[in-house]
Amino acid sequence: MAERYARTEFLNRLRSEIESGRPLVMTGAGNGIAAKFIEQGGVDIIGIYNTGYFRMQGYGSLAGMLPMADANDMVYRIGIREVLPQVKKTPVIAGVNGVDVLRNMKLFLEDLLRAGFSGVHNFPTVGWFDGEFRNTLERTGLGYGLEIEMLNLARELDMLTIGYSFNTADTKMLMKEASPDIFIFHSGITKGGSTGYDESSSISEMAKRSREQYEIAKSAKSDVILLAHGASLVNPEDAQYLIDHTDCDGVQLGSSIERIAIEEPLKLRAESFKRISFPKKRKRPDHS
């Protein structure tokens, strides 16, 4: 069963890696076998998200933003039944839907704590939405502020907090009102593979957009840990580019590790098995 870390201990682990010259790698894990072997690969944080479940069922990440299931219940159950039993030492965090008006959020966070989660991340998030829909959510009491409240409740419970932002306004609000331990600028759906999006985006453009948000985050909290995520971050070379061209301390991987990493290898392995053949002189059975 995964070990639970207090916030300071968790942060010390991460900062030790950074100070040793090793960029951080945070990944999603949509099921137990993914978590088991991702941990063996040496990652620093494993996150459980409702999107991870959908990715492992062959769907795109945005399935997790539609009203098809209870996101918080899904994350909790995947955690206690599949992921946490397979992980030994790597800290595991929960992607929490802070805009869950049907839950007592403090009680839910306490349940996560008891289960073995060491931190939380505001996902799924209304930060995905913009325009009139986002404005309506905000005006009707279903806005980003509830995610801020969730992160602050988690901090009070000594859990590490991770904040997602998709735009400048949310970055400023997040850093001012929640001051998360880790800030991640979500650059958009990861391109590539069967359900990737926005093939036209470039790694250099992603780096530029990320740098702008990192400057805002750093100006509000100088010691915040910065991770890059999404869009053109598909492979280790992309990760290295972002390390070289931004101030990020590492990367967060979702589709890049849970989906793209298994799609082609599974296909190729199935094809290789299908290429087996009978011996030329083999007698075929007579079914007449």
Image (cartoon, rainbow, N blue to C red):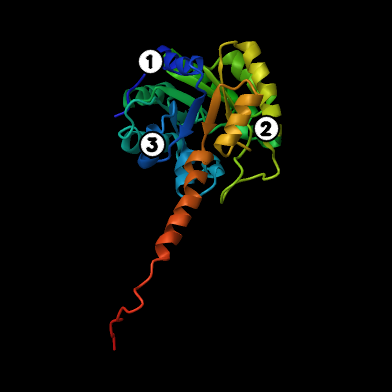
The answer to whether residue 222 shows anywhere in this view is: yes
Query: Please, what secondary structure does the residue beneath circle 2 have?
Result: helix
Q: Say which of 252 and 80 sits in front.
A: 252
* CA separation in Å, label 1 and label 3: 21 Å
The residue at which mark 1 appears reads as 6
- CA gap, disc 2 and disc 1: 33 Å
Q: Name the side, left or right, on which 208 lies relative to 85.
A: right
Q: Nearer the viewer, mark 2 or mark 1?
A: 2
Look at 34% across and 74% down and name the residue there.
Answer: 279
Q: Position of residue 108 (x, y in %)?
A: 40, 26
Label 1 neighbour load within 10 Å: few <14, some 14-19, many 20+: some
Give the label on residue 35, or none: 3
User: Residue most toward the front?
Assistant: 281
Vertical placement of 222 versus 106: above or below?
A: above
Residue 206: numbered disc: 2
User: Tag 1's secondary structure?
Assistant: loop
Q: Are marks 1 and 3 in contact (CB under 8 Å)?
A: no
Whether residue 76 is visible here, answered yes or no, is no
Residue at image point 40% right, 23% down: 109
Which sits in the foreground, 269 or 76? 269
Which of the two discs, 1 and 3, sits closer to the camera?
3
Disc 3 element: helix
